């Protein structure tokens, strides 16, 4: 590869991949310095210059003129060993004024003197190095470009295609990258088919040497939150506000919603005409039950709503600061509904409202008062 071909290749790749020419040239120059030291001379005072127009490559050794040699300073490390810091000017690059003045009569202390030392057969090494650097820079640029496409997608839902699976994971084709969906993160009971479209919640997007690491899930409460926001436009329009989601994936979720328009019912809007909106959400959740809870800034009302389907609930706030405790009084008929099968209703209500809720009947309270 001659100089013109190299320049042409650099321009083509930088334009196609969106890489800065300076990044390529600087990477090339550093790589050639390493190649020179490895193949010709191991001195550290070497500089490589690539002409940005012609592609001509020259190697220079350089010297800084000093009046006396500068050494590193002595210090003792934590283990008691005597060491020396690196001097401000590399030892190989120092030359005494008295040794150089005859060859360079105008030299003075502090000057940097360059001497060309380009080997005759350096072109062969340069060609090989150029290919390596260009390949490396292209890969780095592609990784950075892909990462830029996905770094702001964390905590969002994306639609992909189930492309592969192994013993522990599914792999979701998200376009320019693949997400990892652990089999432990799918909704319990659902069956996935290769090649089918799937919605996933991106729980983690991280840059690695091989490109972005994208971890996906369908069990996270954020998956339910983003489903509502994507299917029901009133959330994006700011008419409805989603205040929180509490979830036991595969069993039940509680979603707290509020309408900022007094003429619009939050729960009815989420359900949609003939239940069309909530039906779409339930289908995506593989039949997982969803309780829509009307949010209230009044904690007693909010907790009462969160304990639905239990009715006739009387709530008393015991502590709304540090411990956040509340007492919910129900009749015997509604006690079972308030607690839920396996305690799931009270568990989700507590998560949603962030209160530790105790449920008691009036008879239980009277018995405790008589003891």
Image (cartoon, rainbow, N blue to C red):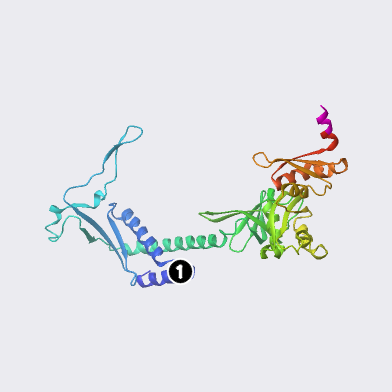
Q: In front: 114, or 351?
A: 351
Quarter of the picture containing the N terminus is bottom left
Q: Position of residue 160 (x, y in %)?
A: 66, 61
Q: Is residue 252 visible?
A: yes
**Residue under label 1:** 13
Q: Position of residue 188 (x, y in %)?
A: 75, 49
Residue farthest to the top? 371
Q: In front: 353, or 276?
A: 353
Chain part drawn in magenta = 366-371
- Describe residue 13's horizontal placement relative to residue 283 as left or right: left
Q: In front: 9, or 305?
A: 305
**Residue found 42% across the figure and 71% down from its top:** 11
Q: Is residue 288 visible?
A: no
Q: Position of residue 265 (x, y in %)?
A: 77, 61
**Residue found 43% across the figure and 66% down from its top:** 20
Is residue 264 in the magenta section? no
């Amino acid at each position: 590869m001659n100089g013109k071909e190299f320049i042409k290749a650099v321009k083509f790749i930088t334009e196609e991949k969106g890489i800065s020419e300076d990044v390529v040239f600087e990477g090339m120059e550093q790589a050639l310095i390493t190649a020179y030291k490895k193949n010709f001379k191991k001195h550290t005072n070497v500089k490589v210059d690539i002409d940005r127009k012609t592609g001509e490559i020259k190697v220079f050794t350089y010297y800084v003129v000093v009046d006396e040699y500068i050494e590193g300073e002595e210090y003792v490390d934590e283990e008691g060993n005597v060491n020396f810091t690196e001097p401000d000017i590399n030892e190989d690059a120092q030359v005494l004024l008295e040794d150089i003045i005859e060859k360079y009569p105008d030299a003075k202390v502090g000057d940097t003197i360059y001497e060309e030392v380009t080997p005759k057969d350096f072109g062969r090494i340069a060609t090989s190095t150029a290919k390596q650097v260009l390949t490396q820079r292209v890969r780095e640029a592609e990784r950075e470009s892909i990462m830029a496409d996905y770094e702001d997608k964390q905590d969002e839902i994306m639609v992909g295609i189930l492309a592969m699976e192994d013993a522990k994971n599914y792999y979701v084709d998200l376009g320019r990258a693949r997400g990892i969906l652990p089999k432990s993160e799918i909704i319990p009971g659902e069956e996935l088919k290769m090649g089918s479209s799937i919605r996933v919640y991106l729980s983690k997007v991280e840059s690695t040497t091989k490109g972005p690491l994208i971890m996906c899930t369908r069990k996270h409460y954020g998956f339910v939150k983003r489903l509502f926001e994507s299917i029901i436009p009133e959330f994006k329009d700011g008419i409805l506000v989603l205040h929180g989601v509490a979830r036991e994936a595969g069993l039940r979720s509680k979603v707290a919603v509020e309408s900022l328009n007094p003429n619009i019912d939050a729960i009815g809007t989420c359900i949609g005409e003939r239940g069309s909106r909530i039906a779409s959400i339930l289908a995506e959740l593989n039949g997982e039950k969803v309780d829509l809870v009307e949010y209230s800034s009044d904690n007693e009302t909010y907790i009462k709503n969160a304990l639905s389907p239990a009715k006739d609930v009387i709530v008393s706030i015991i502590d709304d600061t540090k411990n956040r405790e509340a007492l919910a009084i129900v009749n015997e008929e509604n006690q079972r509904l308030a607690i839920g099968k396996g305690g799931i209703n009270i568990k989700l209500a507590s998560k949603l409202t962030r209160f530790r809720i105790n449920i008691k009947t009036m008879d239980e309270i009277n018995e405790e008062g008589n003891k």
